[in-house]
Image: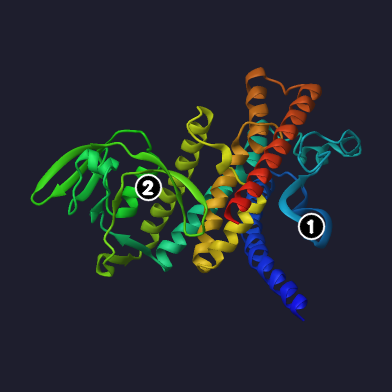
Amino acid sequence: MSFLNEMWAAGWSAGAYIVPFLFVLTVVVFFHELGHFLVARWCGVTVEAFSIGFGPELVGWNDRRGTRWRIAAIPLGGYVKFAGDENVASAAPDPEALARMSPAERRSTFYFAPLPARAAIVAAGPFANFLLAIAIFAGIFMFVGRAVTDAAVDQVDPGSAAEEAGLKPGDLVIAIDGEKIASFSDMQRIVEVSADRPLKVTVERGAQQIDLTATPKLKEIKDAFGNKLRIGLLGIKRSTNPQNVRMEKYGPVDAVVAGAQETWFQIARTGQYLGRLVVGRESADQIGGPIRIAKTSGDFATLGFVALLSLAAILSVSIGLLNLVPIPLLDGGHLLFYALEAVRGRPLGPRAQEIGMRIGLAFVLVLMIFATWNDIVHLSSLG
């Protein structure tokens, strides 16, 4: 009986991570592929299949235009397959399929679509991811609200960047580098991504406004779930008085604006991390794969459905950005080929595209292996 209880507990624990992970990933992948699908239909390109997942089909049906909608056995991505494509990556046309088509049918293939149409179809996937993030954030701000705490300094840590800059308890931060600060979280957002960069901090101290220069220090911290993060810190603490925390709900227009701002913040933070990674000022151990996404999904699910939706928005931004990297096989790689085609006046030759796709595939496989290794190391460090 003890063994059965342990097996049940292990299964329940795994389910607590797998179910949120599948929910988050399915939502993000669906909207990414929906972007490709809708723009392809708008451009008159025939879509043969819309798949969530890879491998054997579990459930499927055909719509009135002949598109096969399918849910596959391996839920780690998805694809849209266009008429005339040799494979699901749209890497090359299928010569035999094209030979069997009439001239009218060829005009409905992705391969023979005009260059602007092909570029729009490819770019629509990442663009849909960004729109999804904006919609999720806007919905949360409008229906749930955002917890806001004034950017008041309650405590200054000894030896911290804040102490070195001259910040004192009771100061109210009202601007950083000329950008208005309305809450403590506004200040955190700027500071976290500004490690080792001097910031002009404007504070209200009594009846005075004072300009100070503070340089956040790069520190490694642990979040509520034990995950290690490296962020910029000033070394100040906010007030813990519940009376200083208020929930602000937004109207529809303001919610969309705030959702767009939140999405841009996620894009900028990711871009800054990658930039610091390239120049060696950041560690690559922050790159995670499916295992870490699953763990994070389970962690966020314990905080409630709204937190899980927030994670879906953040992941959607990450997927959108990843797909825009100009590596063949990814959407950004296709866009790179189309840019070269626009400059040259003709597409790259089949051989050049094939070599590019092989390089892209190797890059993606190496990245997946590296991310999975990071995940395993990360989990072992928690355990």
Label 2 crowd bin: few (<14), some (14–19), many (20+), radius 10 Å: some
Instruction: Give the farthest residue toward the front.
Output: 2
Residue 305 spot, x, y in % from top left: 53, 68
Disc ID at residue 72? 1
What is the quadrant of residue 231 in the picture? top left
What residue is disc 2 on? 189
Identify the residue shown where x is 83% and y is 58%: 57
Task: Report whether residue 270 is seen.
Answer: yes
**Whether residue 375 is situated above or below residue 24 in the rendered picture:** above
What is the quadrant of residue 24 in the picture? bottom right
Residue 380 spot, x, y in % from top left: 63, 52
Three-letter amino acid code of the residue under disc 2? Arg
- Name the image quarter holding the N terminus: bottom right
Task: Report whether residue 264 is seen.
Answer: no
Disc 1 + disc 2, Cβ < 8 Å: no
Label 1 crowd bin: few (<14), some (14–19), many (20+), radius 10 Å: some
Residue 375 spot, x, y in % from top left: 64, 48
